[in-house]
Amino acid sequence: MAYTPIPTVVPKDGFSASEDGQALRAAMKGFGTDEAAIIDILTTRTNAQRQEIAKFFTSEYGRNLIEDLKSELGGKFESVIVALMQPPFEFLAHHLHKAMKGIGTDDQAVIEVLCTRNKAEIQEIVDTYWRLYDRPLAEHICTETSGDFRRFLTLLVTGVRDEPGVVSAEKAKEEAQLLYNAGEGKLGTDEEVFNKILSHDSYEQLRIVFEEYKNLAGRTIEQSLRNELSGSLLDAYIGVVECVQCPVTYLAKQLHNAVKGFGTDNNTLIRIIVSRSEIDLGNIKQEYERLYDKTLESVVKGDVDGDFQKTLLALIGQ
């Protein structure tokens, strides 16, 4: 589904890195911290403008802005403010590393980051991951996952996907038949076929493949996948399918999963709201309301509180 991206954070008119840097220094200097000033400044500047503020902070005061913020803040509020200050691909690499660090892996976080980025963006993430953690992302994924899920994620990060715009109607019919033969048309599932097509084809090509599949099978590719598979591999395939069809729908669903039931997945809230605020968070919140008949703002108000809540609401643009 084509859509016009609606960001909720746009460049600040009349931006001055020196004025903002001085204001942030004043907000953290002395006794107490002016949290409202920090929120007001950092949620209404783009990441590029925040990086300019950080450079001024270092040149003017000889201090690291992120470290000063960490020393003054705490908890979830600190996490979202630090997220705002990280360059975008460092932020995503950090979340991938966090998802795979320690015992267990947050498979859904890895899937979400990798399925919602294009080929060029994934390459940026891969390069940044190597620079930050001195190990290949693919190698880290291989140590934390297994089976066809591991093979699929490895394909996603090794740059095998066709460039955007590469489409062929004839190839789409052939691949739809291959997918049908590998799933609905046989006993069991040939995951290797799904891995190859879903990781190699451009999203534009996959859109045509899925249309051909529905014509052939009489049901959507998503219905067939849910009938054939389960677990993290299914989640990864569905992530690609939904992002091919409409990424804002996929991300609205991920936000809903983060707040439904007992407890809140704050990492997912931060990751999606921060990373999409300059891209299409406006679309995501519209889609959220369409899907769930409630506003994203009201859900955030009901699930989190304090300065963490204020920061998220400022980014959502209530």
Image (cartoon, rainbow, N blue to C red):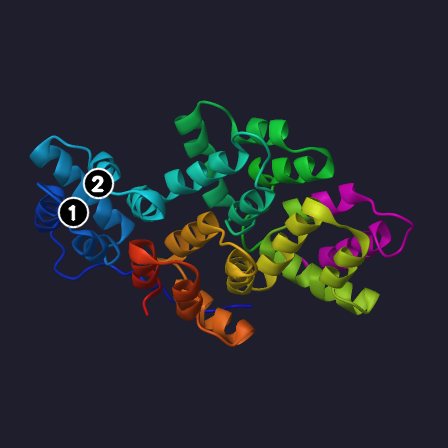
Q: CA distance from mark 1 to mark 2?
A: 7 Å
Q: x and y percent of residue 115 in the render?
A: 56, 49
| Residue located 32% across and 67% down the image | 317
| Residue located 79% across and 53% down the image | 179
From this view, report whether residue 166 is shown above or below residue 68.
Answer: below
**Number of numbered discs present?**
2
Asked which secondary structure carries label 1, the reply is loop
Asked which secondary structure carries label 2, the reply is helix
Q: Is residue 227 magenta?
A: no
Q: Quadrant of the N terminus?
A: bottom right
Label 2: which residue? 72
What's the mark number on residue 33?
A: 1
Q: Is residue 98 left or right of residue 159?
A: left
Q: Is residue 203 left or right of residue 190?
A: left
Q: Is residue 190 magenta?
A: yes
User: Within the image, what quadrant is residue 100 found in?
Assistant: top right
Q: Which residues are magenta?
A: 168-197
From this view, report whether residue 113 is shown above or below residue 93.
Answer: below
The kind of residue on which mark 1 rests is Thr
Estimate how packed mark 2 is, as few (under 14), some (14 to 19) or many (20 or more) residues with alpha carbons within 10 Å.
some
Work out whether residue 139 or residue 1 is closer to the camera in this orientation and state it. Answer: 139
| Residue located 38% across and 65% down the image | 301
From this view, report whether residue 230 is shown above or below residue 158.
Answer: below
- Magenta: main secondary structure: helix
User: Within the image, what quadrant is residue 223 found in?
Assistant: bottom right
Work out whether residue 246 or residue 313 is closer to the camera in this orientation and state it. Answer: 313
Estimate how packed mark 1 is, as few (under 14), some (14 to 19) or many (20 or more) residues with alpha carbons within 10 Å.
some
Q: x and y percent of residue 134 in the render?
A: 44, 22
What's the mark number on residue 58?
A: none
Mark 1 near mark 2, Cβ–Cβ under 8 Å?
yes
